[in-house]
Amino acid sequence: MSVTTQQPAQGPAPQRSAGARAGDLLARVFGGGSATVFALLIVVFVAIFIVNPSFAEPPSLMAFLKQAAPLMILAIGQYFVIVSGEFDLSVGSLVGAQVVIAAALIDGEDGRTVPVILLMIGFGILVGLVNGLITTLLKVQSFITTLGMMLVLYGAIRLWTGGAPTGALSEAFRQPGRGGIDMSVVRQLPWALMILIGIALIAVAVMRSSYGRTLIATGDNERAAGFSGVRVWRVRTLAFVVSSVLATLAAILIGGYAGVTAQVGQGLEFTAITAVVLGGVALGGGRGSVVAAMAGALTLEALFVLFNQLSMPSTIRPAVQGAIIIAAVAYAARERARPRHHQEVPTQPQPNHV
């Protein structure tokens, strides 16, 4: 006995709409692939070298990496939170608070540097725990939780200092942000770059561990992760702690590089989010690479340098960041609306021959 099934004739492929093509473009830019951000990074650097050939010299590149290191560290911390399906809007205010606290407590005394740094790290852990536990145990959306923390830190520091930071950072505190090892070719190998490399290696190792896989699984499908035995609240709370601790380390570098000002840390939370989504990390969580997130931060910093080289107004920075975030959110919404499985059903039953 043989069975033959008549197959339906294949028609021409349907024309794709403009909306679908635009969605595919967003997918290529923000869909989690790292190739795009590295290609963009190369294009931006080539443009900078054309406009200012001296930027390609090793000392200039080292100075650029020293300046970019704090943002790349912030992007690593923000990556841990975003890939778990949450947000952390408090990192900018935390950076500002940590620098102001350090200046007030150290007040130029080198002997106070180490105890104050340890106090800063403890304060960062506390902020991360508060953000994480309120978000996970009290079920408050992380956007609201960290926005509230951002305002609390901003207001508390302004109330404490009266709007004008007091004290001074010690020379020992400023060394990691502006110092380095003197060398012949590059002139100086910055401590900030070496700290960044160490943090990056640890972050890559963590994401390759069981915790990293659990973190991505939680961001991809919180309910399925819970059913499989994952303590979602613990995984996400630890991600918030990592973000706050790395924001503290970024504050140490920023304080050493730029000093103490009333505007320190302002807007860094949105810059870090922009860097992460530029690196292809999905805003809904569950997809993205920590290396690509760092590349996104480096690309964004290089883009700002290019704007300066072209004498463009500084107001273009928030406009570019806003455009990147809107495009990433639009792509994330499109992905959530797309059905996971699509089955083609024939419009007419086909006869079987027995």
Image (cartoon, rainbow, N blue to C red):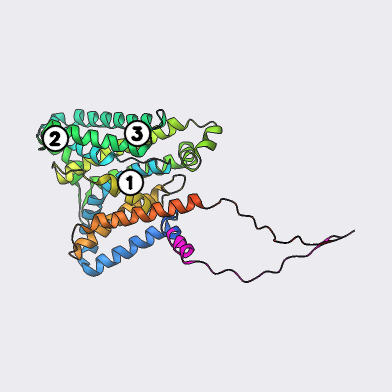
Q: Earlier in the sequence, mark 2 or mark 3?
A: 2
Tell me which amino acid carries mark 3: Val
Residue at 31% over, 30% down:
125
Q: Earlier in the sequence, mark 3 or mark 1?
A: 1
Q: Quadrant of residue 169?
A: top left
Helix, strand, or loop for circle 3? helix
Residue sitting at the far right: 1
Residue at 44% over, 44% down:
285
Residue at 22% over, 62% down:
307
Q: Which residue in the protein does label 1 denote?
A: 75
Q: Which residue in the protein does label 2 denote?
A: 103
Q: Is residue 108 left or right of residue 239?
A: left
Q: Which residues fall within the magenta stretch?
A: 1-26
Magenta stretch encompasses residue 289: no
Viewer-nearest residue: 117 or 148:
148
Tell me which amino acid carries mark 1: Ala
